[in-house]
Image: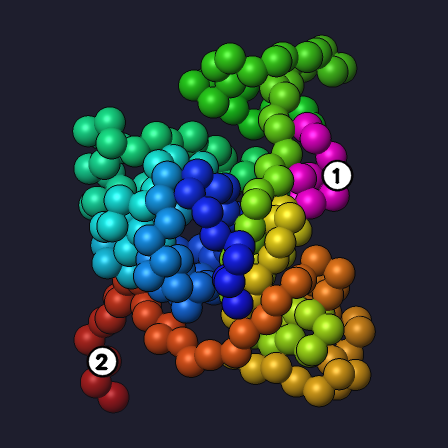
């Protein structure tokens, strides 16, 4: 599915939130390819040894455009030691940057981040007496996303939390490759239930997924 698409120094948008809805099979293929100096736009970078964390272990990532660092010790270590460049984005801003790039919008103004490090070096404008900062839309060379179902034209349905970053990530890629749990017959998806139309999707693969839980939290069973 990634044949002919990967090259050193490219920018990749990756869907998922924590370990929910991550394109784990495509990530493994990128690891195996050996491509390097990558810029990855994703909410986070998986966990140690799984998801995008595998690309940190192999030193294939040069820069992360990301919102959250805390679940990955290697992510923190590389950033704090200066081995990894990091562009912090609030989660809503990152999602909108992806969506905007996919919609042909080169930039937008937001109040989020005004007066913080997020605003450093960014253009500021006043609207209705309030400061807003300019954020650029993200257009990546490749988008890799995970969906629940797809038909053979690329219409996608996401399941629950996996819907948050996957649709905007898919939109932002010049080429979008999707891995799905199930490919269904054309016409079997209710048009009102399609979350992302196939116009954004270029390649689809179906596979088995580990569905690892990021944090297992349990409690003792209460006695009856």
Q: Residue at x 73, y 35 (%)?
A: 105
Contact between labelled residues 1 and 2, with CB atoms less than 8 Å apart: no
Residue 102 within the magenta-colored segment of the rendering: yes
Which range is magenta? 99-107
Q: Residue at x 38, y 73 (%)?
A: 211
Where is residue 99 shown, x and y percent of the image? 66, 44
Whether residue 147 is visible? no
Residue to which mark 1 is pinned: 104
Relative to 223, say whether 204 is above or below.
above
Residue 136 within the magenta-colored segment of the rendering: no
Q: Residue at x 42, y 30 (%)?
A: 87
Q: Nearer the viewer, residue 22 or 126?
A: 22
Residue to which mark 2 is pinned: 221
Whether residue 77 is visible? yes
Q: Nearer the viewer, residue 64 or 174?
A: 174
Q: Any mark on residue 143, and which?
A: none
Q: Residue at x 49, y 35 (%)?
A: 90
Residue 60, image quadrant: top left
- Is 218 displayed left or right of 32 in the figure? left
Q: Which callout, 2 or 1, points at the residue further toward the start of the chain?
A: 1
């Amino acid at each position: 599915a990634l044949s002919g698409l990967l090259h050193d120094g490219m920018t990749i948008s990756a869907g998922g939130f924590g370990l929910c809805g991550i394109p784990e099979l495509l990530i493994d293929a990128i690891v195996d390819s050996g491509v390097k100096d990558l810029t990855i736009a994703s909410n986070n970078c998986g966990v140690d040894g799984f998801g995008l964390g595998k690309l940190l272990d192999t030193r294939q990532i040069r820069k992360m455009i990301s919102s959250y660092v805390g679940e990955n010790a290697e992510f923190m270590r590389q950033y704090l030691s200066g081995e990894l460049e990091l562009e912090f984005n609030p989660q809503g801003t990152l999602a909108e940057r992806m969506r905007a790039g996919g919609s042909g919008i080169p930039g937008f103004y937001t109040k989020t981040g005004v007066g913080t490090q997020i605003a450093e070096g960014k253009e500021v404008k006043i609207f209705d007496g309030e400061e807003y900062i300019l954020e650029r839309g993200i257009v990546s060379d490749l988008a890799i996303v995970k969906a629940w179902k797809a038909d053979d034209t690329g219409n996608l349905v996401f399941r629950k939390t996996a819907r948050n970053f996957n649709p905007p990530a898919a939109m932002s890629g010049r080429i979008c490759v999707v891995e799905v749990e199930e490919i269904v017959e054309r016409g079997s998806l209710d048009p009102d239930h399609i979350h992302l139309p196939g116009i954004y999707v270029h390649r689809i693969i179906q596979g088995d997924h580990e569905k690892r839980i990021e944090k297992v939290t349990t409690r003792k069973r209460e006695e009856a």
